[in-house]
Image: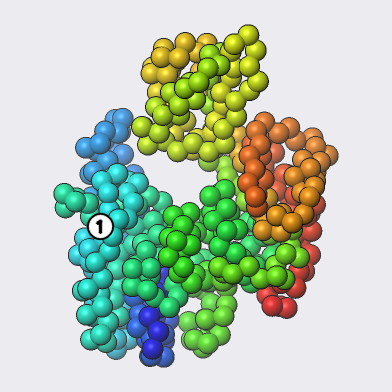
Amino acid sequence: MALIVHKYGGTSMGSTERIRNVAKRVAKWARAGHQMVVVPSAMSGETNRLLGLAKEVSPAKQTPEMLRELDMIACTGEQVSVGLLSLALQAEGMQAVSYNGWQVPVKTDSAYTKARIESIDDAKVRADLAAGKVVVITGFQGVDEGGNVTTLGRGGSDTSAVAIAAAMKADECLIFTDVDGVYTTDPRIVPEARRLHTISFEEMLEMASLGSKVLQIRSVEFAGKYRVPLRVLSSFTPWDISVEEEAKSGTLITFEEDEKMEQAVVSGIAFSRDEAKVTVTGVPDKPGVASLILGAVADANIEVDVIIQNVSQNGKTDFSFTVNRNDYQRTLDLLRTQVQPATGASDVVGDPKICKVSIVGIGMRSHVGVASKMFRSLSEEGINIQMISTSEIKTSVVIAEKYMELAVRALHKAFDLDASIPAIDEAKA
């Protein structure tokens, strides 16, 4: 008997009919002898609807007190989902019980709307599993030390599911989505994109951090830290396919590098539209200035990505970095009111119409000239590179947003990602 965690996204839970299909799928796994924990998201569009209502009644600038109330509102979407799914499971003849995050409890810090999981008490869940019940737990939420409900940010149900799987030492965590796995890039932009049969944890972590929407990055971090076997697969396949067939479908995130995987120098192209560039110009070129700039940004809980400092001229330099577009105006205001006076910088300017495009692949470790090939491909399309960031298995560039789809298509073709590669092609794996 294996302990299996299923996670279902909002689209999979988008209607009562789909919820009944989820129940049938979960019941199939339970009848096959597995202990089942299920983590569903809110029904598709529900969280946006709830937060839209909040914005209507309180459109003012958000305060910490307002963020607490937003979490109180947003968490109700998942509460409805777990109740409906438990009822649907009971209709299938299964014993099922639902819990909110605070009832388990899933303990988090107090960073409202962006909380991080600190611990999970699984005693109650284990007792229910031992009694033969399917346990359905809200994703996306937890409770802080003061008893306040918190949410984990967009995609937080992925993180909840993997964290629960880690805490309970589950045999596998299956992430059911509206896509049938991880692709070389978004098929909506490149129709020739292929589904990967396997992808390494490191590659998935990079792709998640670089804009791939398949999994939230924190869920991948949890999977890597606690060695949780993770599989991404579709909830829109027929619910009555065999458990054995379903257990081998989708994309498996592996922790051991397969020698065959090195045949693919680049495994995927990731991109993110949600980027904005901020530049602090005329900064004194002396020790501690970078810390002053980024320290103030970090204190405001704003995440920074690509960072570039120009060559000093006459004792002055320009300092540029990227942030999420949602944090763009807040970052500009912060830098102009706090950092510019403190550093004596000349100006603070920005550009919200940029994007980030990245190539990712563990094969880059053992091949030279990969970055230059990327730059050459973009140059041939007339695309100017504004910023560059690299690691051992990825190279990212910041470019004008209007060129994003052109860049993705050009790079996908340049690295032959539409070609069949035995190590990662489903048909030959």
In this picture, residue 65 sits left or right of residue 366: left
Front residue of this view, candidates 327 and 373: 373
Local secondary structure at mark 1: strand
Residue 115, position as x, y percentages in the image: 32, 49
In this picture, residue 4 sits left or right of residue 104: right
Q: Which colour style is shown?
A: rainbow
- For disc 1, the neighbor class at 10 Å (few under 14, some 14 to 19, many from 20) is many
- Residue name at image x 53 percent, y 81 percent: 246
Furthest residue in direction left, as rendered: 146
Furthest residue in direction bottom, as rendered: 32
Q: Could you tell me the amino acid type at mark 1? A: Lys
Image quarter of the N terminus: bottom left
Residue 145, position as x, y percentages in the image: 19, 51
- Residue name at image x 68 percent, y 50 percent: 359
Front residue of this view, candidates 76 and 356: 356
Q: Above or below — where is 218 with respect to 68?
A: below
Total tally of numbered discs in the picture: 1
In this picture, residue 18 sits left or right of residue 94: right
Residue 127, position as x, y percentages in the image: 22, 80
Furthest residue in direction right, as rendered: 380
- Residue name at image x 79 percent, y 42 percent: 372
In this picture, residue 419 sits left or right of residue 61: right
Image quarter of the C terminus: bottom right
The quadrant where residue 6 appears: bottom left
Question: Does any portion of residue 39 appear in the rendered image?
Answer: no
The quadrant where residue 40 appears: bottom left
Mark 1, residue position: 107
Q: Above or below — where is 12 with respect to 87?
A: above
Q: Above or below — where is 8 with respect to 368?
A: below
Question: Does any portion of residue 412 appear in the rendered image?
Answer: yes
Furthest residue in direction top, as rendered: 314
The quadrant where residue 140 appears: bottom left
